[in-house]
Amino acid sequence: MVLDFYYFSYQCPLNDNMIRLLNEYRDKIDINLYDISNNHLLAGEMKMFFPTLIVLDKKKRYYSPLRKSFLEQAANGIYPEEKPFLPTISRNFTKGIIEPLSLDKFDIACECCGDKTSENYKKKIEFLKQYELDNYGFIHKNGKGELVGGVEYLPAKVIPYDIPHDDDIAFLTCVYMTDAAYDYKFEGGVRRSVDFSQTA
């Protein structure tokens, strides 16, 4: 079986985890890695608007983070079943402590992925340094200082996806997290990001 892994560098810190996992299966699966960071044509051809895409045998597409169970099935010639992620999201907005997302805050921001390692969040920081921004979004913390939400963005002109690349457009690269009791994303980050982008 052939597995093609398309990814937007370390925009998602889980990409580092998944690449390391893929390397463990190179003797069982024919694996190809494609970093689409500077390849707008490939990102457009693959219709990517998300930092990760897995394609098996050039025909079956997957979007969920890679797990060993997925690769074990692929190694045995089985196309894994991908179930949609259908979270319960509250219509109750809440706002706690909102902070601009600078490079020194990504240690807490990367907790959103649920599988943070010191390696993957440091690789994300190195990836972002090339853009030399003061603000990469906003994070939302509760009274204990714990991450409950956030939003990240980059200038559209550096995004490889097939979108308008005007100088005055930003692209939301990630929005997190989901909770059944409150929506910490919209009030805590998205609205603030829109307001910020309109005044920047």
Image (cartoon, rainbow, N blue to C red):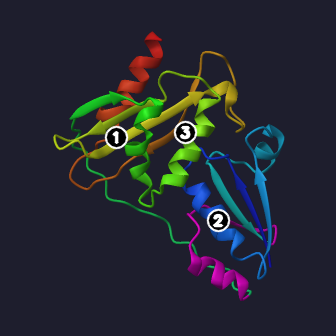
Q: Nearer the viewer, mark 1 or mark 3?
A: 3
Question: Residue 140, located in which quarter of the rendered image?
Answer: top left
Q: Which of marks 1 and 2 is in front?
A: 2
Residue 147 screen position, x and y as percent? 30, 45
Specify whether residue 62 is in view: no
Q: Separation of disc 1 and disc 2 at Cα?
A: 30 Å
**Residue linked to disc 1:** 185
The first of marks 1 and 3 along the sequence is: 3
Q: Does the magenta stretch include residue 64?
A: yes
The first of marks 2 and 3 along the sequence is: 2
**Residue linked to disc 3:** 125
**Residue linked to disc 2:** 20
Say which amino acid is labelled 2. Answer: Arg
Secondary structure beneath dot 2 equals: helix
Residue 136 screen position, x and y as percent? 49, 29
7 horizontally vs 185: left or right: right
Say which amino acid is labelled 3. Answer: Ile
Say which amino acid is labelled 1. Answer: Lys
Residue 69 screen position, x and y as percent? 57, 81
Numbered range of the magenta stretch: 57-76
**What crowding class fits label 2: few (fewer than 14 Cα within 10 Å), some (14-19), or many (20 or more)?**
few
Residue 156 vertical placement versus 79 (above, below): above
Identified at 64% across, 84% down, the residue is 72
Identified at 29% across, 46% down, the residue is 148
